[in-house]
């Protein structure tokens, strides 16, 4: 079926991103916007905008019935959920199918299988992927026994979701009881599912992910990304390809990710995330995100593809027009997430109104944003303001362009983390490439007091 009109069930920069592809392909875009976003840049850029309710996400962006009703009212052929909100919600995909609306994403079963972390782990094992020692636990006693069996320290993780919620590091037995209670409470509050599982903790691990694209039969990979720069399990900077990764490990991760995609008969975009143990030079399956990722632009830069366009084509029922041999990798790309937060004061959120906004422009520089002078930054949503993406012939050129672009970044009216990114981009460890997930907190702690204001 040819898609002529898409309801974009999201906001911010990803809404602008989807609108751009719709416009390029002659597809009408209809933005579903809360009352807080009616006057936003995406609302102005979309062909049409429909109000879906209150500023609070539970009464707008997270309400399946409201989203589907808006799509019906707009006469939309399809719904694109972007990332976050309902992007990995099987209930939305199911409601779309019942309403005769195309859901631009994987099948209901694939969302369910990958959304439950224990189910995802089981599918990974069935597909031959390595997983960390561990398993589900239903009590403190079970958690203690399993941790003793697989070795300390361990991570407690939520079955029903990710993003660091419901995740606790437990270094010794005395910490276990409190950690289990906190993790289960956080998991229940965030995902409506208090189940947790325990995994062995890797002290020196890198977060490497592989981009997949499938049409239900053929599955291809579009390379890897390094997402190891994280604070409290939230990504801040991503790059493609992962620097200083053993080539044999890289190729093995590609093969493993494709094997999982084929096992699932995967349809659409998906990202298989791995933990690479630097000490052992081994990797383990972490999870699969059944949606487009925030960091997808670095993959687009090195493959010169439009991933949103591929999502739409697959949703229309077209077989992939690419073969693995058609996908070539060109240079290096880095993305910085510019957030409305005061990093000098424990990353305190900084909602408000943009007094002025200016970004760099030039060869190898891309900015995905939904802000401009006088734009509102509501307090109800994620703090992401813009993604600064640079591309170079190699990592050295990409870093040079990154530093120059950050120097030109000017956002007034709210606090941002742009200055922190500038310090990060100049640090010798980052410049050398290949830091692990434990590095960024140490980098923060080592900053001189003056840098924190």
Image: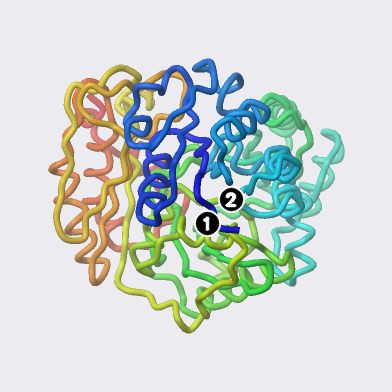
Q: How is the image coloured?
A: rainbow
For marks 2 and 1 on the same chain, the one whose residue lies earlier in the sequence: 2
Left or right: 411 in relation to 314: left
Q: Does the residue at mark 2 contact the one at mark 1 (Cβ under 8 Å)?
A: yes
How many C-alpha atoms fall within 10 Å of the one at disc 1: few (<14), some, or many (≥20)?
A: many
Please, is residue 244 above or below residue 195 in the view?
A: below
The residue nearer to you, when weighing 375 against 207, is 375
- Please identify the quarter of the rendering in which residue 368 is found: top left
Task: Name the one closer to the observer, 156 or 81.
Answer: 81
- Residue 89 versus residue 433: which sits nearer the camera? 89
- Write down the quadrant of residue 421 in the picture: top left
In the rendered image, residue 91, in percent from the top left (x then y), is placed at 73, 38
Spatial CA distance of label 2 from label 1 is 6 Å
Which label number is shown at residue 229?
A: none
The secondary structure type at the circle numbered 2 is loop
Q: Position of residue 290 (x, y in %)?
A: 62, 52
Q: In the figure, is residue 438 to the left or right of 304?
A: right
Q: Is residue 53 visible?
A: yes
The spot of residue 157 in percent (x, y) is 69, 41
Tell me which residue sits at (26%, 28%) in the image. 452
Q: Label 1 belongs to which residue?
A: 312
SS at mark 1 in the image:
helix
Q: Quadrant of the N terminus?
A: bottom right
Q: Residue at x 35, y 48 (%)?
A: 20
Residue occupying the point 54% across, 23% down: 52
Q: Residue at x 40, y 29 (%)?
A: 383
Residue 156 makes an appearance in the image: no
- State the residue position of label 2: 104
Q: Position of residue 217 (x, y in %)?
A: 68, 72
Q: Is residue 412 left or right of residue 63?
A: left
């Amino acid at each position: 079926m040819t898609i002529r009109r898409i309801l974009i069930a999201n906001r911010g920069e990803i809404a602008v991103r989807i609108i751009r592809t719709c416009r390029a392909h002659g597809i009408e875009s209809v933005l579903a916007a809360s009352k807080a976003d009616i006057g936003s840049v995406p609302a102005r850029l979309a062909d049409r905008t429909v109000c879906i309710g209150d500023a609070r996400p539970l009464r707008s962006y997270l309400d399946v019935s409201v989203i589907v009703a808006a799509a019906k009212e707009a006469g939309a052929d399809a719904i694109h959920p972007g990332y976050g909100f309902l992007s990995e919600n099987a209930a939305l995909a199911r409601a779309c199918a019942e309403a005769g609306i195309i859901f631009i994403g994987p099948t209901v079963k694939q969302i369910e299988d990958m959304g439950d972390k224990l189910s995802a782990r089981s599918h990974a094992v069935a597909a031959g992927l390595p997983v960390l020692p561990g398993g589900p636990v239903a009590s403190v006693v079970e958690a203690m026994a399993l941790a003793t069996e697989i070795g300390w320290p361990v991570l407690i993780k939520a079955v029903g979701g990710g993003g660091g919620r419901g995740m606790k590091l437990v270094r010794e037995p005395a910490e276990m009881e409190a950690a289990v209670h906190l993790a289960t409470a956080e998991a229940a509050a965030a995902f409506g599912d208090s189940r947790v599982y325990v995994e062995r903790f890797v002290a020196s691990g890198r977060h490497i992910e592989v981009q997949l694209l499938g049409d239900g039969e053929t599955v291809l990979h579009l390379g890897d990304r390094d997402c190891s720069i994280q604070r409290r399990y939230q990504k801040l900077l991503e790059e493609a390809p992962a620097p200083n990764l053993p080539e044999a490990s890289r190729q093995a991760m590609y093969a493993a990710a494709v094997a999982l995609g084929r096992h699932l008969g995967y349809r659409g975009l998906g990202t298989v995330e791995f933990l690479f143990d630097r000490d052992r030079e081994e990797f383990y399956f972490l999870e699969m995100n059944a949606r487009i990722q925030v960091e997808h632009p670095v993959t687009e830069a090195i493959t010169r593809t439009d991933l949103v366009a591929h999502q739409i084509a697959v949703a229309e029922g077209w077989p992939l027009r690419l073969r693995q041999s058609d996908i070539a990798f060109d240079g290096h790309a880095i993305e910085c997430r510019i957030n409305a937060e005061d990093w000098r004061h424990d990353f305190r959120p900084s909602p408000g109104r943009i007094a002025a906004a200016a970004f760099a422009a030039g060869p190898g520089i891309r900015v995905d944003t939904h802000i401009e002078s006088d734009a509102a930054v509501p307090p109800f949503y994620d703090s992401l303001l813009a993604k600064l993406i640079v591309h170079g012939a190699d990592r050295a050129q990409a870093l040079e362009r990154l530093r120059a672009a950050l120097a030109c970044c000017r956002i007034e009216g709210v606090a941002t983390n742009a200055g922190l990114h500038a310090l990060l981009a100049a640090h010798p460890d980052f410049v050398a490439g290949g830091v692990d997930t434990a590095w960024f907190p140490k980098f923060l702690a080592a900053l001189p007091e003056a840098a924190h204001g």
